[in-house]
Image: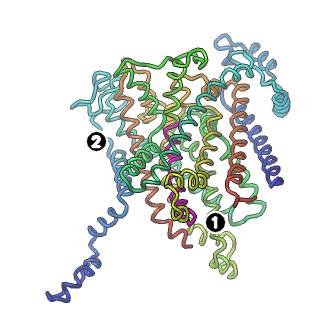
Amino acid sequence: MRTFQAQGSATTAAAEPFLKEERASRLWRAWKLVQANPLGVFGAALILLLIIAGVFAPAIARYPINQFAGTPNQAPNATHLFGTDKLGQDIFSRVVYGARISLKVGFFSVGLASAIGMAIGIFSGYLGGIVDTVIQRIVDTAIAFPQLILLLIVIRLLGPSIVNVILVIAIGVIPGVARIVRGAVLSESRNTYIEAARATGASNLRIMLRHLAPNVLPLAIVIATTLLGAAILAEAALSFLGLGIPPPNPSWGADVAASRTSYPLNVWAALFPGLAISLTVLGFNLLGDSLRDILDPRLRGR
Amino acid sequence: MQRYIVRRLLMALAIVWFISIAVFILLRAMPGDPALLQQGISATPEKVAAIHRELGLDRPLIVQYVDWVGNVLRGNLGRSVLSQNSISREFRERLPVSLELMGLTLIWVVLLGIAFGIISAVKQNSLLDNVIRLIATIALAVPAFWVATLVLIIPVQVWGYAPPLGKQISFFTDPGGNMRQFLPASLVLAFGPIAGVMRLTRSSMLEVLRQDYVRTARAKGLRERIIVLRHALRNSLIPAVTLIGLLTAGLLGGAVIIEQIFDLRGIGQYIYTALLQKDYPVAQSLVMYTASAAVLMNLVVDLLYAALDPRIRY
């Protein structure tokens, strides 16, 4: 869509700056977005990189993982971009394939936790009364419990596997989400449109589903983005301790742990997987911060 | 206010009680039998049964639970299944290690976090401010265990230096050795929290510096340093103090990963090995200690919050 092109004249020359504002070119809008939120866009770019690495791993990685690919403990060189680890595996390939694990664990655990946490928060916040009190006490207990220990205990119960790690992290995250959503619901419920809905005879379930949920969703999305970073860190920590994704899967955390028992010491095997974790979490944190800044005034305006 | 404190204390006790039940059930539900683990290959059904009877594992769960609670309240935490030592004694040996680590970490967090926060706020948007914020953003994204691993590996590669690992050197016998063991660990542990505290101090101080009374102080001609340090700082510390309180709550339970990496034999490592090897008595006692410490610390933080800000009244 292009705006009209005025003929050359003094008035149009004066109007030029204002006409520029109306240009709806996609490129221009994208550039404006970058200018306003450079860090957020950088974060989004990092995440995009992660997703590309995960999706196109077979094409990008040069060597198959879990197999001997060259002399062990090489420094980065032309054939092995990140070097090789103590078992002779190509570190670059393992890092690229590791993106799949991080993505899977991150998105599924946070997705699950957000859905359940949102449901609990809406339920608890809207219904109030004894339901709210009981649920809140349980949530408080869960939050008071030291996080890592809770993860350790439950993972010992269930055994190390990718599904269990997803479940465990989701369990750890749900109470936080529930509490924040409940807070938002408490203030949303005061709004007139809820009262109107109730006056027209809408059932509680309908109000919760059709009115509260869509309005709490932006907040949940912002929280979820930051939680993605935390979830990936948690998976890395669990795998580092040996209680997460079982070997020989290319989990970044497990690879950092493996590098500690490498003899001779291999700095590259420790460096690159951890760098991948850091960049991923950084991406999600930056994106989450930007989203929060963008959505915040709108949230407060309600 | 008094009633609030009493109410919160009762709630904290209730929460701790719930946690004790949850911990008890969870640990009993874990796969793996401690008697088998202890016996190893030489296990026979008779020996396993004998150990079960000795540990009291053949009685109904409720009886076991009540028995355990009774013992704990009397200060008897039982014996470790694996090492056969008194848990209280092992606990007392390991606690100072975790406490020293926690103490050092807190010193870094309080000093550096608040200092950087003040500097960043006072010189808002300057190059220094942006550099500090950049480092803080990175610090919040990097995993502590990675930094710890690099801190251990790189000096060995580059300089051939490694901190003395193994049994903890007491500060009183050899301060140098003690510091070489604890300093790297506490710095790594403090890295992330420093960033968090810095951010909170900065945003809170920015708000405070915009307030009217600060403007009045400037108009009166007070030196900027006095304004910042004596007037503004006190009021901007509140969010940072709450964060530091929560951090302490977490650290009281021992920093599992850092202790493991730096081979510091504290509570964190104790819990980790106990959970891994299904040492019921130890795991139970430790998790209860950690959870209780966390709950109590949370309560202290809430009360501190009210004490610091006179506008908050429960």
| Foreground residue among A239 and B261 | B261
* Residue B212 lies in the magenta-colored region: yes
Indicate the amino acid at tag 1. Val
The subunit carrying tag 2 is A
- From this view, report whether residue B17 is shown above or below residue B231: above
| Foreground residue among A205 and A282 | A282
Task: Give the residue at the far left of this rendering.
Answer: A8
Compare marks 1 and 2 and give the one earlier in the sequence. 2
Residue density around tag 1, few if under 14, some if 14–19, many if 20 or more, within 10 Å: many
- SS class of the residue under badge 2? helix
Q: Which mark is residue A185?
A: 1
The subunit carrying tag 1 is A
Residue density around tag 2, few if under 14, some if 14–19, many if 20 or more, within 10 Å: some
Q: Which mark is residue A80?
A: none
Residue B270 seen: yes
| In the displayed structure image, the side of residue B95 where residue A250 appears, left or right | left
Where is residue B95 shown, x and y percent of the image? Answer: 67, 26
Marks 1 and 2, Cα distance to the nearest angstrom? Answer: 45 Å
Indicate the amino acid at tag 2. Ile
| Foreground residue among A137 and B212 | B212
Where is residue A257 shown, x and y percent of the image? Answer: 46, 28
Where is residue A72 shown, x and y percent of the image? Answer: 31, 22
Q: Name the front one of labels 1 and 2.
A: 1
| Tags 1 and 2 on a common chain | yes
For the point 65% across and 76% down, the residue is A194
Task: Give the residue at the far top of this rendering.
Answer: B42
Quarter containing the C terminus of chain A: bottom right
Magenta-drawn segment: B190-214
Residue B150 sits in which quadrant?
top left
Where is residue B78 shown, x and y percent of the image? Answer: 78, 22
* Residue B59 lies in the magenta-colored region: no
* Residue on which the image places disc 2: A60
